Every structure is written in C-alpha cells, then in structure tokens.
Amino acid sequence: MTRKEGLAENNQELLFLGYHHLAFSLGSREKVNKLTARLQADGYQLLSGPRLTGDGYYESCILALEGNQIELTV
C-alpha cells in the first residue's frame, strides 16, 4: 500500500507510533453506512468515507476515544 500524496501533510496530527487503529469488517456496504451514520449521530468525528478506496475497499474511518481511529470495512 502507498499513501496518497498530500495525505501525511494534511493529517500530520493523526499520525502516531504504536497502536491507534482498529478495523472491523462488517460484511456489507449497508452495514458500513448504517454504523457510520450512527456513530456520527452519537457525536464521533468522521475522518473519511464511506467511500470506495483506490485499492477496492469500501470503508469509513471514525475518530474515537483517545485519538483511536476506527475503520469500518465491508
């Protein structure tokens, strides 16, 4: 995998050492959309998506407690 140009510069504050990212496979785009909407409604910040990534994944990314990133995928 490669990082898109400009991504690191735009999101420097989100780059950490150690564990800070959890990914959950939900099984369908509909489930990704529903859980993303629910988390946003509950006050969590949406970082990206839901979207189809360049490598073919459908995902969204939420900023959770203590700066942890939660990735929701199909």
Image (cartoon, rainbow, N blue to C red):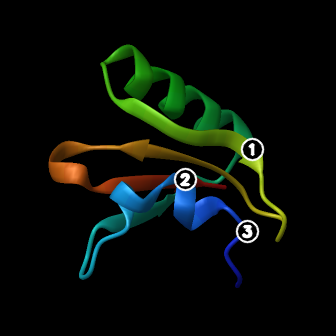
Mark 1 or 2: in front is 2
Q: Residue at 74% x, 44% y: name it.
A: 51
Please, is residue 5 above or below residue 72 in the view? below
Q: Residue at 84% x, 64% y: name it.
A: 54
The x, y position of residue 43, in whole percent, is 31, 20
SS at circle 1 = strand
Residue indicated by mark 2: 10
Q: CA distance from mark 1 to mark 3?
A: 18 Å
Q: Which mark is residue 5?
A: 3
Q: CA distance from mark 3 to mark 2?
A: 10 Å
* Residue nearest the observer in this picture, 8 or 40: 8
Q: Residue at 24% x, 52% y: name it.
A: 67
CA neighbours of label 3 inside 10 A, class few (<14), some (14 to 19), many (20+): few
CA neighbours of label 1 inside 10 A, class few (<14), some (14 to 19), many (20+): some
Tell me which amino acid carries mark 3. Glu
Residue 21 occupies quadrant: bottom left
Q: Residue at 15% x, 50% y: name it.
A: 66
Q: Which mark is residue 51?
A: 1
- Extreme residue in the left direction: 66
Task: Say whether disc 1 or disc 3 marks the residue closer to the N-terminus.
Answer: 3
The x, y position of residue 63, in whole percent, is 35, 43
